[in-house]
Image (spheres, rainbow, N blue to C red):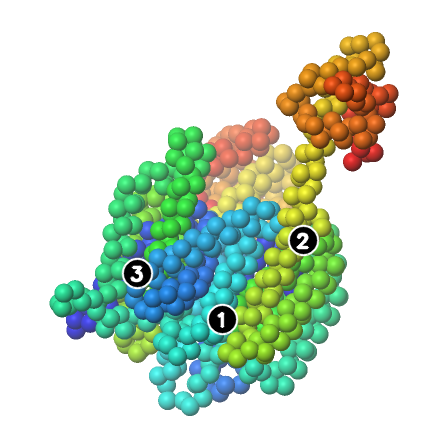
Amino acid sequence: MSNAQLEIQVIASLVAIACAIPGTFLVLRKMAMISDAISHSILPGIVIGFFITHDLNSPLLILLAALTGIITVVLVEYIQKTGLVKEDTAIGLVFPALFSIGVILIAKNANDVHLDVDAVLLGELAFAPFDRLIIGGTDVGPKSLWVVGTILLVTVALLFTFYKELKVSTFDKGLAASLGFSPAIIHYGLMSVSSVTTVGAFDAVGAILVVALMIAPAASAYLITKDLKKMLILAITFGVFSAIFGYWVAHWLDASISGSITTILGLVFLAVYLFAPEKGIIAVLYREKQQRTEVSLLTFLLHLKNHDDLSERHVKHLNEHINWQKVRSKTVLDLAQKNNMITIKNNIVSLTQKGDEFTSKAIDYIITNEDAQIEDMKDDFFLFRG
Amino acid sequence: MLGSFAVLRKQSLLGDAISHAALPGIAIAFLITGAKDTNTLLLGALVSGLIGTFWIRGIITKTHLKSDTALGLILSLFFGFGMLLLTFIQKQPNANQAGLDKYLFGQAATLVERDVWMMAIVTGICLIVMLTFWKEFKILLFDADYTKTLGFNTKTIDILITSFIVLAIVLGLQTVGVVLMSAMLLAPAAAARQWTNSLSVMVFLAAIFGAFSGVFGTAISATQNNLSTGPVIVLVASVFVVFSFVFSPSRGLLFKQIRFIKNRRDLELHKTLAFMYHIAESHENISHPHTVRLLNNFQGYTKSTLQKLVDKQYVELNGNMWNLTKKGFETAANLYTKQTTDDE
């Protein structure tokens, strides 16, 4: 592993951490698409900054770009406030317009300089180590390392200082306002941090990867935990893991680093999406199936309770009467038997005492509209779940 | 045109997500066929766009992640994957690979006659389908539950609309590119929405706005060198939107402001009149004169409101004294019980 490779991985990991922190809050505040808008609309800021300084590496560029990012947010909010269109439409209108201005500015004025849309949008991590920062003649490391590092430090410092405020205002705006934190200041503060992070990271990794690094780790973490602290840590872990693993995939495929990091992020999310213990698709489907069986069981028990006739309680008859498929009635019967709620003698089904008790309680809850209680009750009665 | 449906369904950013999600489709189609045939590439884009859309759906319905997160996620992940494939293709020894990235930013000038024909045909199909299922689309749009009770298969209609939006986006990709496609989808519809409340008029207007911004944008970019078509079209469309926001008669900002001011003036007028009424009420003769000083600002009194009341012959003014006329008294008496219309 050469020095340059190490540097690339360090930069990528730093960017991943710097993005994961604001990203978590964006996802929680349902503003994830804002990051996409910002990443596009910083283009005119960069272009204008370039015309003023004629230097792609000047800090003014980052400042102007961050400013355009904030302008985007303000514009979106203004349009949204007029009530003429929905928020998402407002986002969809603002950033293409700004982006177009940027593209046109480039096309008109910057033909002969090295500044093109691809470079801004896609970025190229592989060249990051070659852009060194020289202070007093000594080489102190790649420039983007310093830029991203500074941004990360500021972000982390802000996070620790305002952790409580951020947490409260994210989950309960009303409470935050009544406690005396201004939601507006926190909102714009967060937006500024996202803007600056986007801008600082984009020339290392490209705009699309910034969006992916902000949203994907946070979304994956959100599927696993509901604890904000754990979510932050998980998001950071996912980000760093994808950054380093993605680099080696790119190395192996000889393809774009930012692309492969994004792909790894996608795979991580897919895995979490499918296998997360409580919120994953498989868990959700399993739970849905379980609940369906249990509701069927309840219906079945109610039916038994209401009918004393032997003919009504015959196994065959139940099949026809409640109109269940054979497999399903067998599952339900088995479940009921396993839980000692029914006994079957000569194909005649009858409730046990426990089953009877369970059913009457369930009826009580259903009549009083406290359906949620049934879930607790199931815990008390069931030996086996559906 | 189809954008109208997207805007009204609050899925505006779907366009953005789909246009990004189409990229890996293009790359994979190229990897499989190895040729740069427009149709296969578009087919790939269509398929991956649809996969993206349905994955977004899945995330929203099956987990607690919100739609914005799902959109942003799919958008960036698919796009990143597409970039990976594109750079991978670039390393392959295949002379055909150049120009694939044209799909990213769009180049209307590269369109050949065959592409135009194809677009025309697809647009025609879209139109026919839309007209056939007009009622179903409309009802699903505004009241999904009602549609279900009527026995329509909402899922099928839903998939139909979504597929057509995806199709339209994929076709437009060639012209304006990934980033600007969402604006093409949204801007005309958002502009049209300001002018009307009727769906049919809105769709029609959106089509006209879209066509106009296309024509104007192309014309402007043709007059100058170095001006790519896509961004100019988008900017023209944005101008339409801003114009509509400000000047539309019923929803526009300008008229809203004017209405707001007018309402406030009416309110002040009514307040003054009501105050006068209460004073006059305590006297037997309603036309008994009082001094102007009795009125104060808090009751909405200003010189101009008093003058206006005089103009309307509700009040007579003699030097520093005023008195209500009979007409004014009656109007004031009715203020609380019914809204008078003749004092607008």
Identify the mark at residue B247; answer none if there is no mark: 2
**Residue A104 image label:** 1
Q: Specify whether disc 1 shares its chain with disc 2.
A: no
Q: Amino acid at mark 1?
A: Ile
Location of residue B342 (image quadrant): top right
Query: Could you say whether the residue bearing mark 2 is in a helix, strand or loop?
Result: helix
Q: Where is B284 relative to A327, above or below?
A: above
| Residue that numbered label 3 is attached to | A59
> Does mark 3 fall on the same chain as mark 2?
no
Q: Is residue B123 left or right of residue A120?
A: right
- Structural distance between the alpha carbons of marks 3 and 1: 23 Å
The front one of B2 and B343 is B343
Q: Check disc 3: other Cα within 10 Å, few if <14, some if 14-19, many if 20+.
A: some
- Given the image, what chain letter belongs to the residue carrying mark 1? A
Is disc 3 placed on a helix, strand or loop? helix
A224 horizontally vs B46: left or right:
left
Label 3 or label 1, whichever comes before in sequence order:
3
Dot 3 and dot 1 within a common chain: yes
Image location of residue B265, percent across then percent down: 70, 33
Is residue A249 in sight in this rendering? no
